[in-house]
Image (spheres, grey):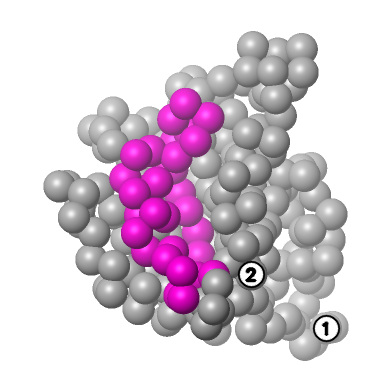
Amino acid sequence: MTRVLILTAHPNPGYSRINQRLSAMATSLSGVTVVDLYALYPSFKIDVGLEQQRLKEHDVIVFQFPVYWYSTPALLKEWQDLVLEYGFAYGDGGSYLANKLCLLAITAGGAELAYCADGANRFPIRTLLSPLEQMAGLCQMKFLPPLVLFSSHVAAKDARAEQHVAKYKQVLEALRDDQLDLPKVFEQNLLGMPMIPLLSGKGDTGGQSHG
C-alpha cells in the first residue's frame, strides 16, 4: 500500500464550503494521513524536524488548499520556506523527496472560464500554479496534474460539491492502491479532465511503484 500524506491549509476553516468536507472524507480513508497545518501551527511555529520526518514516511504528498491570490495560503508558503530546506529537499544531499508523487488538490472561487488569456484572471490555473510545479521539480518529485474545483463558492448549490468529494476519494484511493494509470495521468492538463485514468486492474499491469 502506498502511503499518502495530505497537508491541508485553510486560514478560515469555519468559512470553508468544500475543504472541510474534503478533509473529513480523506480522514476516513485507511492508509491516508491528514494533517491540518493551521490547527497544528496557529502561531506559525513549524516543527521542521517533525514535518521532514513525515515527508520521509510517505510516498505521495498532497497539498490541499483554497487558492489565495493565485498562490497558497500564507502558512503553507511558510511551511515550504522552512521545511523544504537545502540538503533535505534539494541541493547537496537533498534527495529525500526524490520520486515521490506530488498532487495539488485545490479549490478556486473563480469559474474555469476566468482562467484563460481572455478571462478575468488572464492565465490558465496550471500556469498560475507553476511556482509549485517548479518546487516539486527542484525537489525531484513527480508533479501530477492538479485536481481543481472551480467556482467553489457555489459548488454546494449545484451538486458539484458531492461530485468533487467523490472524485477526490477516487483519486486518493487510486494513489493509495497504485491504481492510477500514471502515463495517461501525466498527459492531462488537470486531473480528471475529462476522467481520471485508472488501471483496468492490478492483474493487468502489476501496479506501479512510486519509489
> In which quadrant of the rendered view does residue 179 lie?
bottom right
Give the x, y percent position of residue 81.
39, 54
Image-based side of 5 in relation to 121, left or right = left
Q: Which mark is residue 205?
A: 1
Q: Quadrant of the C terminus?
A: bottom right
Q: Which mark is residue 140?
A: 2
Give the x, y percent position of residue 139.
58, 67
- What amino acid does circle 2 point to? Gln
Q: Residues within 10 Å of mark 2 (few under 14, many from 20)?
A: many
Query: Is residue 82 magenta-colored?
Result: yes
User: Is residue 59 shown to the viewer in this render?
Assistant: no
Label count reads 2
Q: Quadrant of the N terminus?
A: bottom right
Q: Secondary structure at mark 1?
A: helix
Q: Residue furthest left?
A: 43
Q: Is residue 52 above or below residue 165?
A: below
Magenta region: 61-90
Query: Is residue 98 magenta-colored?
Result: no
